[in-house]
Image (cartoon, rainbow, N blue to C red):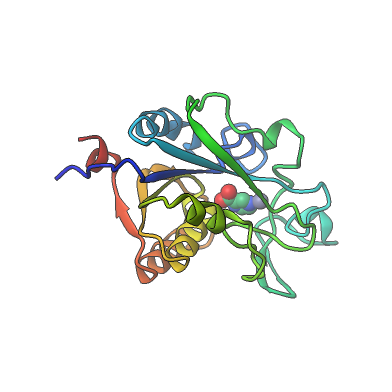
Amino acid sequence: MTIEIQPNDLLVVVDVQYDFLPGGSLAVAGGDEIVPLINTLARKFAHVVFTQDWHPADHISFASQHDGRQAFEMIELSYGPQVLWPDHCIWDSHGAEISADLDIPHGQLVIRKGYNREIDSYSGFQEADRHTPTGLAGYLNERDVGRLYIVGLATDFCVGWTAIDAAAAGFEVTVVEDATRAIDNGGSLAKAWAAMAEAGVGRVQSKDILG
Ligand code: VGL
Ligand code: ZN
């Protein structure tokens, strides 16, 4: 059965930025493969918004800021465990730009996240302290949107956390699995799908929407 996208449904395109694409500093395997599919899906939606990972050069999530630490190690920060990343999506750098291969002229909003030096933000809704809002829920509520569909990078970090926070904010939310790609570091992908299922996040394939 094909899902009928309604006029007030909204597509969230998460972090399709050069640093997460092949050649980028935190490249997600196959990240470029989803771009044409996202373009096709976006034509079904009257409403599309983007998230953009947007860090200062000395961001606390960068391994380079922690003596003797390597990328992909875990550390404990004031708000809990944090994966250390290679420097990525430094504001105003090429790597932070949203891919020009996205062809979504009707996109309506770009919400930036991760700009506070001391707090990471995978989610488009709330920073990793689980407290500081980005404003996206307020924006969506004020616009009276319907269901949310989420695509982009990476399934197990920014897509997953955005989906879970969208559900917590009261939205009916579905991830389009084949329009995402994962980092999958230390079992993170399986963990993310379990957490999304627990939160009531739907999981479909693009053919369920495109027919
Ligand atoms: C992301 C790690 C660090 C993502 C962002 O977009 O999934 N992952 N920053
Ligand atoms: Zn980041």
- Say above or below: 194 vs 176: below
Displayed quadrant of residue 90: top right
Q: At which x and y percent is residue 148?
A: 39, 51
Q: Say if residue 184 shows up in the picture.
A: no
Quadrant in which the N terminus is drawn: top left
- Say above or below: 184 vs 17: below
User: Would you say 1 lies left or right of 34 here?
Assistant: left
Q: At which x and y percent is residue 36?
A: 41, 27
**Closest to the observer: 71 or 91?**
91
**Closest to the observer: 110 or 82?**
110
Query: Residue at 52% across / 50% down in the picture?
Result: 183
Quadrant in which the C terminus is drawn: top left
- Say above or below: 187 vs 59: below
Query: Residue at 41% across / 50% down in the picture?
Result: 145
Q: At which x and y percent is residue 62?
A: 75, 54
User: Would you say 103 lies left or right of 131 here?
Assistant: left
Q: Say if residue 185 shows up in the picture.
A: yes
| Number of marks in picture | 0
Q: At which x and y percent is residue 41?
A: 35, 34
Query: Residue at 69% across / 74% down in the picture?
Result: 79
